[in-house]
Amino acid sequence: MADAQYDYDLFTIGGGSGGVRGSRIAASHGAKVAIAEEYRMGGTCVIRGCVPKKMLVYASMFAEELGHAAHKGWTLGETKFDWATLRDFVNGDVDRLEGLYDGTLGNAGVEVFSERAVITGPNSVRLASGKEITAKNILVATGGWPLVPEFSGNELCITSNEIFHLDELPKRLMVMGGGYIAVEFAGIFNALGSDVTLVNRSETILRTYEKDIVDRLPPIMEARGMDIQMSAQIKNVTKNADGSLDVTLTNGAVKQVDQVLVATGRKPNSEGLGIETAGVELGKKGEIPVDAYSKTSCDSIYAVGDVTDRVQLTPVAIREGHAFADTVFGGNARYVDHSCIPSAVFSQPSIASVGLTEAEAREQYTEVAVYTSDFRPMKNIFADRMERGLYKMVCEAKSGQVLGLHMIGPESAEIIQGAAVAIKAKLSKADFDATTAIHPSMAEELVLLK
Ligand code: NDP
């Protein structure tokens, strides 16, 4: 396919989920493709996000399971936890996955440049080494970057970029924020043995999730030993001679901790990218505005994933990269439907959601019916844990079409994925009810909702 006028048909900037998928599929359609990645192939999800985080979630669950096992007939010897062993195992697996990503690109015939690239015009990029390259199309997939608010001493804090590499398990960890990253890492480090404080600027965590579901989480987190400071912000952080940090909150509280994790959102990674040289203006947050087909205002430049600030989720970036490649190189113009995207928070217990919340449904539909199951999962009964699960289904009242499903409880992410297919297919509450339960399971509650 290569157009002799250019060095490549496609030059991709950013080797994360969206960039790798877009490049690989473009190459499979016959395009001559190169990709530049300035850090490590795999991007946030593989290198310092979803994948190593999920491994830490699994590891943190061991602590709990060990405790239960001791009450159910198991004789355990002395148990102690070594952070460095876990950290090195997780980072070793990340190295393995990075190698797989490199291999995938190599097998697809994509040329890899392990350096930064900036855009110098509609069809040109410059590598950090100074090499100038031309391309018929450019795909920007540079992802996002942690956003750290201004406060005195913020340079003493860490973000999710650093947390996977800590020398020691912090005895005392303060987490700032009430979103995905804050809640997930608070749960992980609490279970691993840290004394965790979560500081959230409002009275609500996980603001975009169904309120009834989210309201269950803070009391559970507190019962598990975490200190939740709502309606508070960090005012300043100072470092003591022994390396510990004194944190003053806006509510007057002062706490001494060993690490402060700032998890207050992520901004599109577009600074210094040079896209304005191609006439593309960035949005207010630094996002690259694109149309449904991920095309920017410049016909030859496309952008996918977090840098576009549409939906900051890996599977979405992958779909956008794939749809871009099919559209531009596969003769199959298609775009990603951003509605009804299932998502999960790997808190302890986990939260999962797909479709509209009750409040959103009531704004869009005149008659809404809500069904719930408030239950104590058998797993929790067996483990003498008092925590209850809550499943909530939001339907259009007349047709019974399921508009949204929201859950808190063990394994919610695993359970909702299958149900999300039914909801995406616009099935109704009657279709759920017509399905026989698998007993005993937590998932059976989905077909027994009242
Ligand atoms: P989120 O957008 O999820 O949450 C940001 C949190 O920080 C909110 O509680 C917000 O409060 C708070 N906040 C924002 N600005 C400030 C400020 N200036 N001072 C104090 N608090 C502030 O961001 P995360 O960093 O947790 O995660 C980034 C993205 O990564 C997510 O959007 C998500 O898409 C993705 N992610 C997904 C995961 C998953 O799928 N399981 C896991 C981890 C990350 P308020 O609500 O008041 O605005």
Image (cartoon, grey):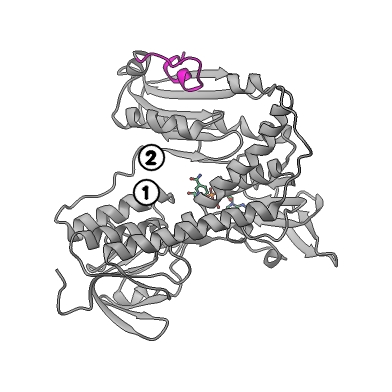
Q: Which residues are magenta?
A: 435-450
Q: Quadrant of residue 386?
A: top right
Residue 165 percent location from the top left of the image = 63, 60
Residue furthest toward the right? 241
Residue 421 percent location from the top left of the image = 33, 31
Number of numbered callouts drawn: 2
Asked whether, in this view, residue 351 is left or right of residue 136, the answer is right
Residue 423 percent location from the top left of the image = 34, 29
Q: Residues within 10 Å of mark 1 (few under 14, many from 20)?
A: many
Task: Return the residue at label 2.
Answer: 341
Q: Residues within 10 Å of mark 2 (few under 14, many from 20)?
A: some
Task: Out of 374 and 96, give the one closest to the viewer.
Answer: 96
The residue at 67%/23% (across/down) is 383
The residue at 63%/38% (across/down) is 61
Residue 53 percent location from the top left of the image = 56, 49
Kindly identify the amino acid type of the residue bearing the numbered disc 2.
Ile
